[in-house]
Image (cartoon, grey):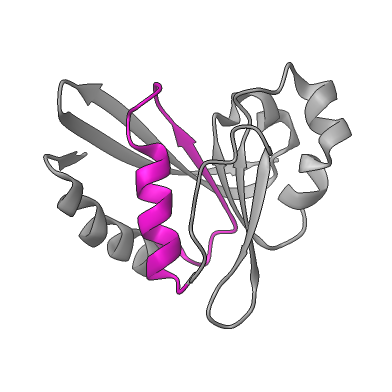
Amino acid sequence: MIEINSPQDYEPLARNLLKNYSHIAVWLFKGEMGAGKTTLIRKILHEAGVQDEVSSPTFAIVNEYADQQGKVIYHMDCYRLAGADEALQSGIDELLTSGNWCLVEWPEVIENFLWGRVLTITFEKTGEIRKIQTELKAYE
């Protein structure tokens, strides 16, 4: 378990996650509203060389970025999806199996579409302190 006490703590965490898990294509970010999911994703994408402004795709569902080598990265937010049918209609299942890096907030609605090794990053918010836990899981 990693403890985040200030916004500056996200940068070394982002570097560490990239160093250890960049070979995993799908990362799931779980936690309550305001727990720091988008903040960490922003730091991860900037560490990966994304030059664009990184924002939450809450209304767009998916934002697309490119890393410094031009490889596509998808940042998804499934919060507004009503269920698996709506996720299918939005094409998220195709993005998850594209082989491109997919960073997914509020992933519960799309977990049935997962396969292979997936990194789950879970946030627990207690006041200003965030506790973050990582788990590598294999889906079949």
Q: Was residue 125 drawn as part of the magenta stretch in this picture?
A: no
Write the residue at 16% across / 39% down.
3
Where, by quadrant of the figure, is residue 139 drawn?
top right
Where, by quadrant of the figure, is residue 25 drawn?
bottom right
Q: Residue furthest front?
A: 53
Across and down, in percent, residue 50 comes to 49, 69
Where, by quadrant of the figure, is residue 125 drawn?
top left
Is 119 placed left or right of 20 in the picture?
right
Residues drawn in magenta = 21-49
Across and down, in percent, residue 24 comes to 54, 59
Across and down, in percent, residue 95 comes to 76, 51
Is 80 placed left or right of 103 in the picture?
right
Q: Quadrant of the N terminus?
A: top left
Is 63 placed above or below 122 here?
Answer: below
Q: Residue furthest top?
A: 82
Tally of numbered tags: 0
Is 82 placed above or below 45 here?
Answer: above
Q: Residue furthest left?
A: 5
Write the residue at 59% across / 31% down.
107
Is 10 placed above or below 120 here?
Answer: below
Across and down, in percent, residue 121 comes to 40, 40
Q: Was residue 27 drawn as part of the magenta stretch in this picture?
A: yes
Q: Residue furthest bottom?
A: 69
Write the residue at 79% across / 42% down.
93
Write the residue at 18% across / 21% down.
126
Is 104 placed above or below 95 here?
Answer: above
Q: Quadrant of the C terminus?
A: top right
